[in-house]
Image (spheres, rainbow, N blue to C red):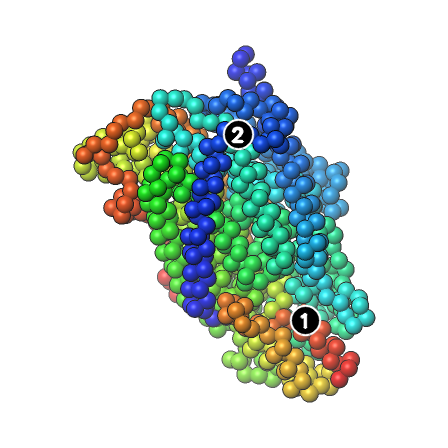
Amino acid sequence: MVFSTASFITQVAVLVLVLVLLHKPLGVYMARVFSGTKHSKPEKVLYRLAGVDAGTEQSWSVYLRSVLLFSLISILVIFALQRLQDVLPGSNSLPGVDPWVAMNTAISFVTNTNWQTYVPEATVGIFVQMCLLAVQNFLSAAVGIVVVVALIRGIVRTTTDRLGNFWVDLARASFRILLPIATVAAIALVIGGVVQNFWSTDVTNAATGAAQTIPGGPVASQEAIKVLGTNGGGYFNANSAHPFENPNVFTSLFQVFLILLIPSALPYMYGRMVGDQRQGYTVAAVMGALWLTSTCLMAWAVSSAQGTSTAAAGGLGEGFEQRLGPAASSIFAASTTLTSTGAVNVAHDSLPPLAGGVAMLNMMLGEVAPGGTGSGLYGMLVLAIIAVFIAGLMVGRTPEFLGKKITPREMKIAALYILVTPTLVLVLAAVSALLPEVMANAPASGPHQFSELLYAFTSGANNNGSAFGGITSSGPYLSTLLGLAMLLGRFLPIALVLALAGSLARQRKVPASSGTVPTHGPLFGSLLLAVTVILTALSYFPALALGPLAEGLIK
Amino acid sequence: MNTISGYLRQAGTAARFLLLATIVLGLLYPLAVFGAGQLVAPFQANGSIVKDSAGQPAASALIVQAAADSSGTQSPQWFHARPSAVNWDPASSSASNLGPNDPKLLDAVNSNRAAIAAEEGASPSDVPADALTASGSGLDPHISKAYADLQVQRVAQAHGLEATDVQTLVDQQTSSGLEAFLSQPSVNVTLLNLDVARLAANP
């Protein structure tokens, strides 16, 4: 297969054009959703039945407690019902899920990671897929969105400890933003060829004698929210490489569009909520520059067609779908790792070494370009606070961010935030590399074995969910260590972001002075870009050198 | 005491919220998409099942269907699909997940090249990359135009057909236009073999 540059440029151009057209209306709409005071009739019923006092706003600690309790209950319910799959309807005659796998999967879907340690076709029936996993695709994405909304409120509000009501925000993100878009997208996917039924079909080719059972299931409905919510948990093992999840190059491009849709509209919502659109555009520009650079880097690395087996085959092919082609797969691989999606339409494990390295680097950036639904923007805003602090040091002034002083407390929170994921990835990968039980599950040899391990923990701690699939993570060691990476990689940052929001909301606004560093415009944008790349990516350089760089550079 | 009861109350809210959200997002939403799909695109929604001349479901247009025996050897009578990590069985789906420098993959590529060149009576250098490598899903029904062209002679001979007639079928099944521009010119083996069977029955 030959990488088509013309196709690559066309697809990138279409994506940019459509996202530029849609970011504003969607951003305005989302800002309105979270600023409105009216509850719809069904929402009122929901609040009454669930016992939500919709009129009361919460402090940051209560907001956080709601996030954590909701996630904990979700994990417990999903774990228990997977274990009981065999006695529940819709099991497709599959047994109860193995406890390690059930634990890992429950954490994986609640944390918006969607790491799939299980083989769906052989592990989970329609009930688990539709009523447990796909539901978390909505709710975990909504949690990401509401956390960034709480942070923005913290930036905007003054001398208050109120950040909003988690349950109200969660309901609005789920039912007013995700559900309507997912419904339209799912129907579009069905028209494009994605399956949506509840039965399999036996087929027999009388001429060739081939007999097959063609699988079915509520695939399109799960597929739409899988990409829209930057989740990535596929209905089938092969994920978006499976013809029933991703029938052709058009659905592939449509899925990349859905992956990027909400994350690229959130900066506009942010600009609108803080009342200064230049802020939103600066963040969006940094995200866009990183996305474009990294996508081109991925295209270059894929088209290089490095690797001994690739050379022997005379071109790309292993792990690629003929009907999608390498250009579509490059764009997909870049976008899925620059967000917290982790859906794949090509086997990342078989990508040329440096392309696998770019995928890892994308996740290591902290998934902020444009990042997962909500998590990308809150990651970028924490980096902006660090950038403003560094700028403040340079000009010798107390740093301010949108009229709020960045005091030692805010800086400590921001510093902890950026330490969480590198610590998790590097420590857990290093510990695992010393465990023979773990290394036995990564059958590759040489630097690629380390790459598979590094990819797994990078993906887990950053809540991405894509994998170098050669690694088997269903055993007790890896499923526990990866479960830990996913849990801490999701909820420590969320706790820190909400603490930051609470701390900012308590302050009064300081008027901008001549010493205030503007947090918009090309100068600040460049600084933010530099901070993002230097702080996050360089933490991982030695680890990358041992894995994909070693693979790509030695012959 | 106050905090504990506060926690319990919120846990109750969380459980009830999850249950209600599941009814909407886990039942009503997929059922609504199912209903809409059956209404606007029943063919696609049910797996793009194509029927043979007798009206029996013969294959899915989207899923590879190889005429292979239990040992995984594809019948010389029909167009071959790409190698598959799941033996072309849609009960599962997977890539080989072998790294680009993996010696096992290198061996597989080299032995595939030798076997295909021998079977088609072609020079080893004429075998295209897609014929030697497994797809990401193991279920990709498509092969390159080059690989399809390579197989025309053998398939035509096996069915006693004119090579030009079989070549016409290949050309008809080759993707074109915008789709081919955005991906690459590809031939759907599942549909092509059905076309060959139809032509062989009514030459």
On the picture, is A276 further left or further right than A31? left
Q: Position of residue A228 (x, y in %)?
A: 53, 47
- In the image, A112 versus A353, the foreground residue is A112
Chain letter of the residue carrying label 2: A
- Furthest residue toward top: B1
* Residue A325 shown left or right of residue B79 in the figure: left
- Residue A273, given in percent of the width and then of the height, sits at 40, 36
In the drawing, does residue A435 fall left or right of residue A544?
A: right
In whole angstroms, how far apart are the C-alphas of marks 1 and 2? 54 Å
Label 1 vs label 2, nearer the camera: 2
Q: Which residue is mark 1?
A: B191
Q: Which mark is residue A38?
A: 2
Look at the image and tell me whether residue A170 can be seen.
yes
Secondary structure under the numbered disc 2 in the rendered image: loop
Give residue A184's position: percent from left, percent from top.
Answer: 59, 49
Q: Residue at x 42, y 29 (%)?
A: A498
